[in-house]
Amino acid sequence: MKDIHSHILYGIDDGCKTFDESVSILNKLYKEGITDLVATPHYIIGSNYNYDNKYKNKLIKELSKKSKINIYIGNEVFIDNDIYKCIKSNKISTINNSRYLLVELPLENCCNNTQDILLKLIDEGIVPVIAHVERYEYLSIESLKEFINIGCLLQANITSLNLKYGRSPKKRLKQLLKNNMIFILGTDTHISVLNLDLCLKKLSKLVNSDYYNNLINNNFDKLINNEDINIGGVYEEV
């Protein structure tokens, strides 16, 4: 599996705290079958989660010497009006410096200007990849379809299939997968690694082989290589 969402860079967010912890987690992920991953530390404007790209690249270089996993730069950016300014000033990284950006929404309730911010990013040539959409229970399936229709991609955490976040996110993810609304999966690894083999087995029972391969491998390659993607209308009607 190739992992689009992880918090393995040490000491800069709520993920790994030390170099040794990062190396340990990377080794565990490799044993679980992860070959490539994007390091996506939280970036929250106005908080302590604000390390710039120069520092992130330094950590990636250090960890790459100790891991067999290919590590790419990125961020999980909390939605904010000033995201594009931070990209231009080299504070926030898109996925491997592509046009694709992992964006996090509030977990409890919606921002009134969410769609306006997403549209602003799209107007600037940035494609928002909405992180772990199965966890935003306040957003209806129709709302998520609208995100797709305006040009966003939806990411989900494969570990939701193993009840990491409870029964409701698992049920919601299964519904989204059934309707082909998820573009890519990630682990969202912080400081522990769940049984990915079990998660993958559950996934294989929910989707066909082509969709399965796109979710865990092929679409990852498209994102990091900045390839064009046909986004709109990919889902089935509920």
Image: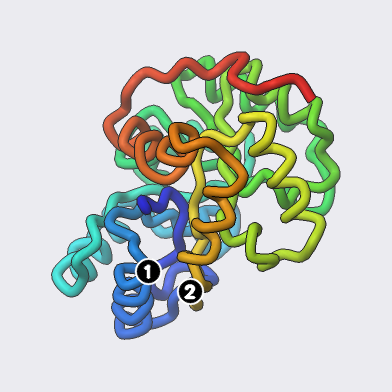
- In the picture of the structure, the residue carrying the numbered disc 2 is 193
Quadrant containing the C terminus is: top right
Callout 2: helix, strand or loop? loop
Pointers 2 and 1 in contact (C-beta within 8 Å): yes
Q: Position of residue 143 (x, y in %)?
A: 78, 28
Q: Is residue 215 visible?
A: yes
What is the basis of the colouring in this image? rainbow
Residue type, numbered disc 1: Glu
Vertical placement of residue 26 versus 208, above or below: below
As displayed, is residue 155 above or below residue 142? below
Q: Residue at x 50, y 57 (%)?
A: 200
Residue at point 39%, 67% (across, down):
8
Q: Residue flagged by tag 2: what amino acid is it?
A: Val
Q: Secondary structure at mark 1?
A: loop
Residue annotated with mark 1: 32
Residue 130 spot, x, y in % from top left? 59, 39
**Residue 82 visible at all:** no
Q: Using a 10 Å C-alpha cutoff, classify the residue at mark 1 as few (fewer than 14 neighbours), some (14 to 19) or many (20 or more).
A: some
Q: Position of residue 65 (x, y in %)?
A: 14, 70
Disc 2 versus disc 1: distance between alpha carbons? 9 Å
Few, some or many C-alpha atoms within 10 Å of disc 2 (few <14, some 14-19, many ≥20)? some
Q: Nearer the viewer, residue 22 or 173?
A: 173
Mark count: 2
Residue 61, image quadrant:
bottom left
* 118 vs 193: above or below: above
Residue at the image point whose x is 62% and y is 49% from the top: 132
Residue 34 percent across, percent down from the top left? 34, 60
44 to the left or right of 41: right
